Amino acid sequence: MTSPATPSRQQPARIEKHTIYQIPLDQRHGKARHLFTLWLGANINVLTVVTGALATTLFAQSFLAGSVAIVVGNLVGAIFMALHAAQGPRLGVPQMVQSRGQFGARGAAYVVALVVFMYLGYAATALVTGGQSLHAILPAVGEPWCIVAIGLISLAAAIFGHDLIHVCTRLMTYVAGGAVLLCYVWVLFVNRVPEAFLTQGTFSPVGFFGMVSIGAFWQLGYAPYVSDYSRYLPPDTGPRRAFWACYWGSVIGAVMPMILGALIGPAVVGGDVVEAISRLTGRASTAIVLLFAPGVAVAGAICLYGGSLAVITLMQTFVTDWRASSRARALIATSIFVAALLIGLVGATNFLPLYGRFNEILLYVMVPWTAVNLVDYYLIRHGQYDVPSFFAADGGVYGRYNVAALVCYLLGILVQVPFIASDVYTGPVARAMGGIDFSWIAGLIVVSAAYYFALRTHPVAALSLTRR
């Protein structure tokens, strides 16, 4: 396990050399407050505006009801997201590697594979919204070429890695944050948004809690990312400082653009939120969209970078003597970029409905993972892990499979089924509640209780806790 020795001030190389392995103490750097600007800057982009627009488009809520749902969902979801922040400084490895401590060396591979899919989907959505933003500024350039251009910028930042992404998100805190504020001023006080935008739609429990779930999962969806960007911090970084920096950075960064999206939602035609922003902001549209565009490229970089770490984790599970280099990480990030680009080009014409459905699917499969991870880290092992075992061919003290974790994960998916309310399927409990989807809450509660009980009573699980 990592010792609490004091790290030196040695500066890391420009292109990050580490991949999924524990960061040496002499290369630890940064402050907990840097996590605030990371998550604030990472959230403020057009994709977040698109997500907020779901409140008044897909869920047909009034602006007031949609805004309250956005705030509630983000405040609740960010609790679980930010709890992962302390794991990075303590263990010095990416989030998905640390999952081997809960699921076992090969058991974690199933979850990692789902996370790779998640990164791929989010990268594709970032490229689409970024391409639409750039096309709005340069209409003479075809939208597909704009998507490619944004993707190449994202890829370059992902290849440089951790430190450059931190710098970019810090910059976006001011650049994209200024774009959001300018957009609010122009829409509300200069062009004066039509009054119908504020009164259109109505409160409905189904739509309200649907948007609460989207807001919560916006935050929960970051859970597999968090340690990737805190693992370079010194191991004595206070867990409370790391928690609150992540929490408020992510909440503020998400709520501001999401409420903007809810405001302009009634003006969205064909799912093109960027076009609606341009139309509502008039003369200021070029400057606003220009300020927004880099933020989407940064979001894409985060997805490509995290996706490359997840793919390396998946591959290293089965080729245990392979030590991935920065060149391998760059090649994998490029492969993810190409796949995301193809998905983005195909799905761009029907983007908003596809994005809403994508979020729902991820909600159901990722909630059980975060419940297992957090219960294991905070309530079972109290942050005490044997990091070398994460990379052992046989899983070390954690073995190849943790049956209790895998069963609880599967249980978490199954227990959500009766609570699901979607266009494709509505479970009996959701139907009895008028179509309100509380599946993610059921998943969190049941998995947390079941996993805690299983590891406190199962003799094999208990043995793994004592073998240090």
Image (cartoon, rainbow, N blue to C red):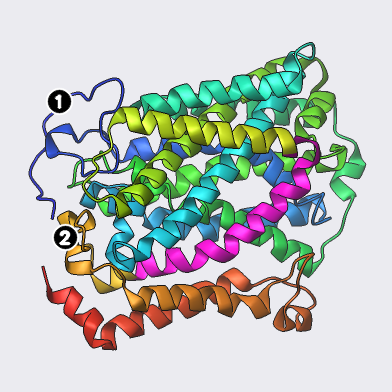
- Of the residues shown, which amino acid type is indicated by label 2? Asp
Q: What element carries label 2?
A: loop
Q: Residue visible at 27% across and 36% down?
A: 31
Quadrant housing the C terminus: bottom left
Vertical position of residue 387 compared to residue 404: above or below: above
Q: Which of 367 and 215 is in front in this view?
A: 367
Q: Residue visible at 27% across and 88% down?
A: 457
Relative placement, left or right, of 261 versus 407 is right
The answer, for residue 165, to whether it is visible in the render is no
Percent coordinates x, y for residue 445 in the rendering? 49, 77
Residue 349 colored in magenta in the image: yes
Percent coordinates x, y for residue 371 in the rendering? 43, 68
What secondary structure do most residues of the magenta stretch adopt? helix
Vertical position of residue 118 compared to residue 443: above or below: above
Residue 10 numbered mark, or none: 1
Relative placement, left or right, of 414 versus 11 is right
Q: What stretch is highlighted in magenta?
A: 347-375
Residue 197 sits in which quadrant? top right
Q: Which of marks 2 and 1 is nearer the N terminus?
A: 1
Q: Disc 2, disc 1: CB below 8 Å? A: no
Residue 43 numbered mark, or none: none
Quadrant housing the N terminus: bottom left
Q: Mark 2 points at which residue?
A: 386
Percent coordinates x, y for residue 37 in the rendering? 43, 34
Q: How far apart are marks 2 and 1 (CA)?
A: 26 Å
